[in-house]
Amino acid sequence: MTTAATAPETLPLFGAPRDEPETAALVREAASRGTRLRLVGGGTWAGGGRPVRADATLRLSALHGIVDYVPGDLTLTARAGTPLSEIARVTAAERQLLALDPFGDAAGTIGATVATASVGPLAHAFGGPRDNVLGLAFVTGTGDVVRAGGRVVKNVAGFDLVRLLTGAWGTLGALTEVSVRLRALPEVDATVAVALPSVRELDAWLARLRAASLAAWALELVNAPLATQLDAGDRALLLARLAGNASAVDAQRATLATLGDLRELPPDVWARLRGCEPADAIVARISARPSRLAALCAELFAPAARAFGLMAHASVTRGVVRFVLPGADGFGMPRASAPATDAPPVRRVLERAPAALWPMLAADWSAPRATDALSRRVRAAFDPHGLLNPGAMDAPDAGPAASS
Amino acid sequence: MAAHTAEIGGHALDADALARVAAALTAIVGERHVLRRPSALRVYDSDGLPGYHRQPALAVLPGTRDELVAVVRALAAEGAPFVARGAGTGLSGGSLADGIVVVGLNRLNRIVSIDAENALAVVEPGVVNVTLTRAVAPYGLHYAPDPSSQSACTIGGNVAENAGGPHCLKYGVTLNHVAAVTVLLPSGEIVTLGDADGEDDGYDLLGAFVGSEGCFGIALDVTVRLARDPQAVRTLLADFADMDDAARAVSRIIAAGIVPAALEMMDGAAIRAVEASIYAAGYPTDAAAILLCELDGLAAGLDEDAARVAALCRAEGARDVAVASDAAQRARLWQGRKKAFGAMGRIAPHLVLQDAVVPRTRLPAVLARIAEIGASHGVRIGNVFHAGDGNLHPNISYDAHDADESARVHAAMSEVMQACIDAGGTITGEHGVGLDKRDYMDALFDAPSLAAMCRLRDVFDPERRANPGKVVPVHACREWHATPAVRRHAGAAS
């Protein structure tokens, strides 16, 4: 068993196609030679996800540009290598936005966002890529160009290849084009912070928050070290993005003020949250039913987390805690020990780690993604030779998989 | 519609195989729950779309999860194709079984558990949609997907079709409200797709399963996400003398950043059909179109949004905008919309109802084109639809026994579907492809894309026994449509 992935920067470049037919031709050529390809867009996910063992890189960043944008339809189609920042710039001019805000810098592409199914705080209101992608085109591992879904907001024509490709990490096909739905910006879009109670009181506090009448676009908890990193003070906070007309936003402010000290924050706090992690960080996520969130936060939000500079944030409604451990040595990594046997299930995902550390951490932190028979058959159906991003959906190399 | 004559494909069981299947199923569920007499099977010979009739060989009605598993395993042992069926309210001929076995799921109707704290419920596939909403109402929760058939249709059927409904404009379709499904594969194997307990980061097989129209397996149970009841609701009725004006108002409202819970349009013919029926809702009978707009959410700010919607409608030419003053009036306005197709039953013996989606900005042009197509074929095409999503439901009341009229209706509907595709739309937003729209799939997808769909189906059902012959056109995937059973009984297939 190999233990480390080849670093992407050391792989030879197989090609950098400029359009879909060129992409298909290159994949067919790779298939004929048995060359395993690492798919790279903007490169922002190069250190993320499971280690890929490939022979060469297929660079997709030249598949770039917005193909179609009809503001009145609130839909947009872009080539997969188009950065989210470019989509944001174009749609902002029409007072619209694509409600996908994955973590990482603004160079991240729409293709990588969809391929990794990455979500950020806006998932509270709008879900993730699976809820916002209307259609896509991709090149399978045999070089076929497949179009799925469409450009309208509601569509059940045929079997759902859109959802299947979303979050497949490129292992079923190289995305070439993505159609998404957009949202209109509200009259008022305000960001406020509310101080969190102690970890001991968090459970009851979160129950009150969940029962409160809010129509927020995002409700994200951040621990004290992360609040400091965001220039938002030195206490653990709830960040709330309140949207709607002035009356609705004011009413929500008043509701939140009953839960703790409330203050206004500049809207760029969300961009800073997305970009909080250093390039060499270890990033992982823990999730459970939302009612378990306080228990999940117990360690990551406790004062001791500060000693390791461990930054953590959590989606209130999705029940997902994401934490960032600066430094590549894994020192201070929270124990991922199995919960007591009668505790409800907890899911763990390792998002980013140095390739050398991955096997050790993955044993505890990332259960096999796609090792069941159905998933193996899916992979074989779309990439029969296993050429595209091999390893990206596999079980960890070392040790038994954590089962939770 | 073509489809009075459309072939599902020859999958019929021969007499010997049928006798063996019947014996095996009877041993599992008992004599009473295996139907074989033509008179008993009559209720299974069509679904909510009149015009198609296919006689199943047999219907089996398991009463428990264990019985269902045993039934499917018995069918697998015999290599027998089958069609799973809920309430039969589907509108695309998707649950027709031509000489094969119907597995009826209506007896599997338990709500297994409700986790109000996390707004989740586990239900069996035969639970009726509105029954779930009633069961969780005491917790201040509801199940958001609300097809017009919600008082009859089942959650299992909703999952199979990825059903929508008026409120999916704001709340999304079935897929957005399903956390996990335990699936009984056609082979008899049981798998869990999705994860209600936390993040599931494998392939989105749940996303692939929802909307697979019964071709991937049967849901043994469904874990659904429940929605919190809104603090307040406002329902507005805008009355237009011109349908174009109403269509333009739809785009204006959406673009203004207001997301109505629902935004529905009915044309004059539909309005008059409703007002002449027991479902009369007080709609203006001289209107060319009405918009029914529902806003919900926080009480604060809702009246401002309602006033803004009213102003936008007036700016586009609405003659009047009324706001329902109480829950009873609101319910009455909605009943008219939800029962509109039922009300049309008064007009003629048959109704053909289509389901297409166009970009919202193309609504005025497409509605005009639909009227032209109707006029050129001498048929009156009505429109009752989810305008906020651009999800059209063109419909024609007619007499299917009149061959000439049937032919004209068929020709008109085919042109309507093509017009929607030409406008950048799709052939179904919520009813599924089934049998009815299978032949339009070529206009929407090229051969490699259709082949990719076939490969996905083969992952779940390599023997191609679950709801054979549906969704993907036969010629696109001939190998797929020809099940092993058919190949064995090639003589009987033609």
Image (cartoon, coloured by chain):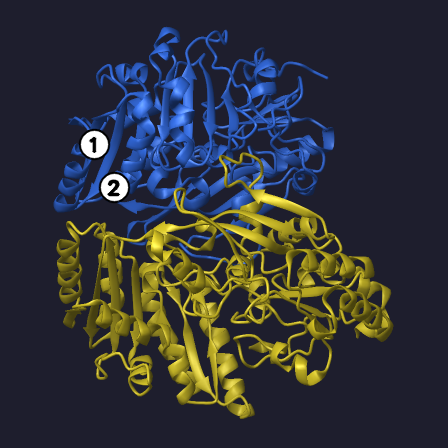
Chain colours: A blue, B yellow
The answer to whether residue B427 is above or below residue A151 is below
Residue A104 x %, y %: 39, 24
Residue B305 place in picture, x, y as percent: 16, 55
Q: Which mark is first along the chain, 2 or 1? A: 2
Chain letter of disc 2 in the image? A
Where, quadrant-wise, is the C terminus of chain B in this rendering?
bottom right
For the N terminus of chain B, the image quarter is bottom right
The Cα atoms of the two marked residues, 1 and 2, are separated by 10 Å
Observer-nearest of B197 and A360: B197
Please report the residue visible at 24 percent of the width from the left and 44 percent of the height from the top.
A213
Residue at the disc numbered 1: A259
Q: Which of A347 and A117 is in front in this view?
A: A347
Q: Residue A212 carries which label?
A: 2
Q: Is residue A330 left or right of residue B290?
A: right
Q: Name the amino acid type tagged 1.
A: Leu
Label 2 near label 1: C-beta < 8 Å?
A: yes
Report if residue A63 is visible in the image. Answer: no
Q: In this view, does B318 lie above or below B456?
A: below
Rendered location of residue B202, percent (x, y): 57, 35
Is B297 rendered above or below residue A330? below
For residue B434, which quarter of the picture? Answer: bottom right
Residue A117 lies left or right of residue A35; in this view the side is: left
Going 63% across and 72% down the picture, which residue do you hit? Answer: B96
